[in-house]
Each structure stands twice: as structure tokens, then as C-alpha cells.
Amino acid sequence: MNRKDRATDIAGRLDLFYPDARCELDFETPWQLLAATVLSAQCTDVRVNLVTPELFRLWSTPEAMAQADLAEVEEVIHSTGFFRNKARALRDGARTLVADNGGELPRSLEGMVGLPGVGRKTAKVVLGEAFNIPAGIAVDTHVKRLARRFGLSDETDSDRIAGDLEGLLPKARWVGFSLRVVLHGRRVCTARKPQCDDCVLDGVCLQRV
């Protein structure tokens, strides 16, 4: 089986296994999703979801965050790690949105990565989940690990892995595929103890062919 056929088979099986896949970060607006995704760097979604209710109560919009005291933001998000960098990214990003885009999030990859603290992965997550715009496949640690296990990429660089995956699947599948691979990496194909015997991808994943 070539890579394209394997990718199509894997995507189809994951579609069936995770029919209601969604981002596990809690949010109500695109700005809130952006803020939560920034906080999720080197932090679990569970921890971020414990922090964001207070964050969003105090600064629910870019306009509010743009006026925030940096020390107060740092205190609220402290437990997510790298809190100083994240607090500055949130405030500076909010100020950029207010000054340049009327407080609205850009709806392009180029516009999103122009915001402070927003890389390509974050941009792809927000565009896909908040606006259903398939800007690309977001590659986090789970997607990076599983792309190699699945035999869909030999690369180690996240952008190169994303390029390989995006070349194997149509745009219509990009957003859902990324979400489902993340869930699969968390629940079944874990780093330390993959549950290959109970995996829906048995027979198509390169580890079990």
C-alpha cells in the first residue's frame, strides 16, 4: 500500500472511530480559542481549561486584554508554565488585533502568524476550529509521533511533516484528521504504551502491517 492509500484508509478509520472529534480546549469565541491555544503550549488541555474560566471572566475580548496589567495576567495563567512569555503574547496579540483588525481575528494563515506568539500550528488550529478554514494540518507532539508510526512521513521537522500529510489528504479532511490523530495519540497510541492490540488501525498502521 502506498502512502496516499494508507493515509486515506487511516483517515477513514479515524473518522468512524472519532465521529464527534472536537478541540478539547473550552472556548466560546475565536479570541478565546486563540488565547487557550497559546496557553496550551507545553501544557495539557486539562490544565488550560482550569485556568481559562478566570482568564475569560477578566478579559473576555481582545479589547479587554489589550488594556490588561501584565502582572495580573501572569498571575492568572501562572500554572500553565512559561507564563511570562504567554502573558506578553496574549496582551501584545490583543493589542495588535485591536489596532490593526478592529479586534477581529484574521482569517488567513499569513494574518494569524503575524500575531505575537502565534506560530503555524496555533494558527491552523484556530482557523480550522473557529472558522472551519482548512489552512493546513496542525502538527503537535501527537501528530508528529503518529505520522512516523503510521508511515506517512519520515521527517522530524513539524512543518515538513505537515507538508507531507497535506500532500496525502484533500483539504476537506485536514482539520478533522489533525483533531482525530491528536485524540488517538492521547487515548490509544500513547508515547510509552501504545495499545496496538485494541487499535482501529491494526493492519494499516506501519507498526502493525
Image (spheres, rainbow, N blue to C red):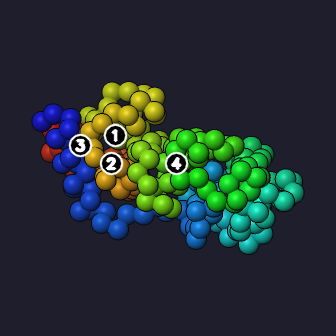
Label 1 – label 3 distance at C-alpha: 10 Å
Is residue 168 left or right of 33 when viewed as pictured?
A: left
Q: Position of residue 178 (x, y in %)?
A: 39, 50
Does residue 170 appear in the picture of this structure?
yes
Which residue is labeled 3 in the image?
7
Mark 1 closeness class: few <14, some 14–19, many ≥20 residues within 10 Å: some
User: Decide: marks 1, 2 in contact (CB < 8 A)?
Assistant: yes
Q: Earlier in the sequence, mark 2 or mark 3?
A: 3
Per the model, the C-alpha gap separating discs 2 and 3 is 13 Å
Q: CA distance from mark 1 to mark 2?
A: 7 Å
Instruction: Name which residue type carries label 3.
Output: Ala
Per the image, the residue denoted by label 1 is 166
Mark 4 burial class by Cα count in 10 Å: few <14, some 14-19, many 20+: some
38 relative to 139, above or below: below
Residue for badge 2: 171
Callout 4 secondary element: loop
Give the camera-side residue of 78 and 193.
78
What residue is rendered at 41% in x and 30% in y?
A: 160
Residue type, mark 4 in image: Ser
Q: Are marks 4 and 3 in contact (CB under 8 Å)?
A: no
Note whether 88 is above or below 145 in the view shown. below
Q: Residue at x 66, y 45 (%)?
A: 115
